[in-house]
Amino acid sequence: MKVLKRRLGKTSELVTEVGLGTWRMGGGPRPDLSRDRECVDAIRYAIQLGMTHIDTAEMYGGGHSEELVGEAIRDLPRDEVFVATKVWPTNLRYDQVLRSCEMSLRRLGLKYVDLYMIHWPSDEVPLRESMRALERLYKDGKIRHIGVSNFSVELLEEARSCLSVTDVVANQVEYNLLNRSIEVDLLPHCMRQGITVTAYSPLAQGRVLREVERGSKLGRELTRVAAKYGVTPAQVALNWVIHHENVITIPKAVSRRHLEENAGASGWQLDERDYRALCDASAP
């Protein structure tokens, strides 16, 4: 099993095309310590399987998710893991962004994060102010790359225009067989501009696989393609998401079986006919 890597934006950085999302590891909006050992073991096993791109956020578990990631990677060489985290929209004033990053670094036990993103855009804080803070962190070596999340084409370009010494390398958005809205303009735009799309909820939080259970048109197509390639329907759905070269994904999983299944979605590719068949089957 080998999880392949792809270029991050226009940089020379390589990140795994299938990584690990950590939403609800360590709690929802508030900390939950009841499954800490299980979550830390899951993060370590994901890395062992080759999924070395670990995505978290200051909002996940009220910061506890970052603490779990920090514990999981504490004894690893720093360059063996790519850590991404995000600042919440209530903390997008200049000084708040700087403070949020420092607190994330403390929880993660790191001197820098590989990718720092605005989690959601804010209507209350000028984007230029937030991006100026991100660029300050970049210049100070606290973050290696700047990204955004849930940004439209217009907001993405506004964010890019606010930077002077680096560029936005990634936009993290929802993308799966049941939500293909980014294909209208955002995905083509990012492909043209050399910006990585990081797909979250690639299985629509389980709804894609429920299509298989209920035998819908999409479910039947997933079953057919899975049998053809000798993989699972989940692996087909994940591989469909990363079909385009500039798309990577961060499915969340805790069980070893699901982690192994996710890792197995990398290292092969749907042929164009099967990719199109799945597109047709998932069309509204």
Image (cartoon, rainbow, N blue to C red):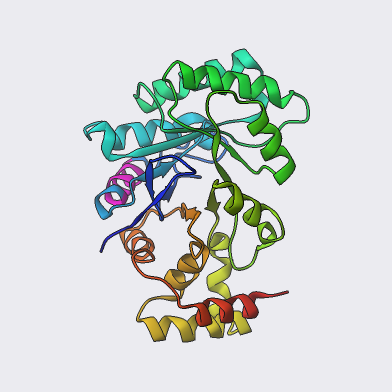
- Is 149 included in the stretch rendered in magenta? no
| Residue pictured at 54% horizontal, 47% vertical | 194
Q: Quadrant of residue 69?
A: top left
Instruction: Please provide the residue range marked out in magenta.
Output: 37-46
> Count of labels shown?
0
Residue 279 in the figure: left or right of residue 41 = right
- Tell me the quadrant of the picture where the C terminus can be found: bottom right
Residue at far top of view: 95
Residue at far right of view: 123
Q: Is residue 92 visible?
A: no
Asked if residue 61 is positioned above or below residue 92 in the image, the reply reads below
Majority SS type along the magenta span = helix
Residue 114 percent location from the top left of the image: 41, 33
Asked if residue 9 is positioned above or below residue 282 in the image, the reply reads above
- Is 38 included in the stretch rendered in magenta? yes
271 or 236, which is in the foreground?
Answer: 271
| Residue pictured at 29% horizontal, 48% vertical | 47
| Residue pictured at 54% horizontal, 64% vertical | 206
| Residue pictured at 65% horizontal, 51% vertical | 189
Asked if residue 230 is positioned above or below residue 241 in the image, the reply reads below
Residue 248 percent location from the top left of the image: 47, 54
Residue 179 percent location from the top left of the image: 65, 63
Residue 268 percent location from the top left of the image: 36, 70
Q: Is residue 277 visible?
A: yes
Q: Quadrant of residue 230?
A: bottom left
- Tell me the quadrant of the picture where the N terminus can be found: bottom left
